[in-house]
Amino acid sequence: MDILYFAWVRERIGLPREVIETDAATVNDLVAQLRTREERYAAAFEDISALRVALDQELSDFDAPLAGVREVAFFPPMTGG
Amino acid sequence: MRVSVQEKPFDLGAESTIFAAGHRDIGAIVTFTGIVRDLPDDPMEAMEIEHYPSMTQKAIEAMAQDAIARFSLGDALIIHRHGRLVPGEMIMMVATAARHRKDAFEAATFLMDYLKSRAPFWKREISASGASWVAATDEDEAALKRW
């Protein structure tokens, strides 16, 4: 699964994207898996209320299922306009 | 409808003129332009705008289609830049065309509220004292509730 990071999430984790082997059923499960990897992941995912997630380029929720999803993106609340 | 996500500057006058031309059933056009504003106590060297390329265009197109349906627009234009900008530069513009001004104004506000909180851009301000990500505000999120 392709995992993308933007803005300060990208900076904290130290890379813009990576491919991860996962059998996580939901976004929350994936976050739990990522948190256990290294301290920088634990720091980035410390407070998921400060994060947003998109599944295959559509905004979604942390309890959404990952079945059939190819790309997951994590980022802070958007600041366009 | 046209949506352009681009790094290069745009010509506000030319874009507005092209957008306004050739309608016989449009009575009102509203344009909004967003400018990089300097920081009051900490002069900004640049604003860097990051985005999510494969999501940005389609997210904005969905907003524009929503606005067209909701406010019966004849047309809508959204241009949003990314990359490195300096204070005074134009970041983005929205133009809406409707039969009457109320719909044109409301559609422009609707689009701005959505672009602010739902288009995948992230702004970073760079000044002599360092760089910091612009935080989304509760006010911006609350603005969506009126729609």
Image (cartoon, helix red, strand yellow):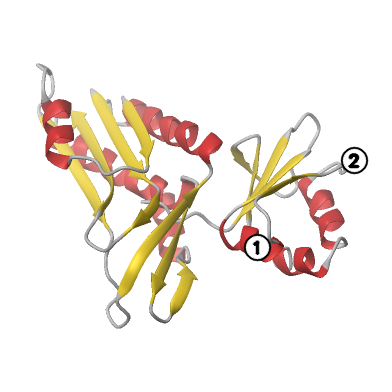
- The residue drawn where x is 81% and y is 70% is A39
Query: Dot 2 lies on which element?
Result: loop
Residue B28 position within the rendered picture, expressed as x and y whole percent measured from the top left = 12, 32
| Residue B72, picture quadrant | top left
Question: Pointer 2: what residue?
Answer: A23
Q: Residue furthest right?
A: A23
- Quick one: B28 or A35, which is closer to the camera? A35
Q: Tell me where residue B24 appears, x and y as whole percent.
A: 9, 16
Give the amino acid at mark 2: Asp
Tag in front: 1 or 2: 2
The answer to whether A60 is drawn above or below residue A74 in the figure is above
Mark 1 → mark 2, Cα distance in angstroms:
23 Å
Q: Which mark is residue A49?
A: 1
* B67 relative to B146, above or below: above
Determine the chain carrying the residue at label 2.
A
Q: Residue B91: where, in percent of width, then height?
A: 30, 51
Provide residue B19's location: percent of width, then percent of height: 17, 28
Q: Height in image: B18 above or below A11?
A: above
Circle number at residue A74: none
- Residue occupying image coordinates x 15% and y 26%: B18
- Relative side of B146 to A25, left or right: left
Instruction: For residue A9, say whether it is visible.
Output: yes
Residue B147 appears anywhere in the view: no
In which quadrant will I find the N terminus of chain A?
top right
Which secondary structure, mark 1? Answer: helix
Q: At 48% across and 36% down in the image, what residue appears?
A: B59
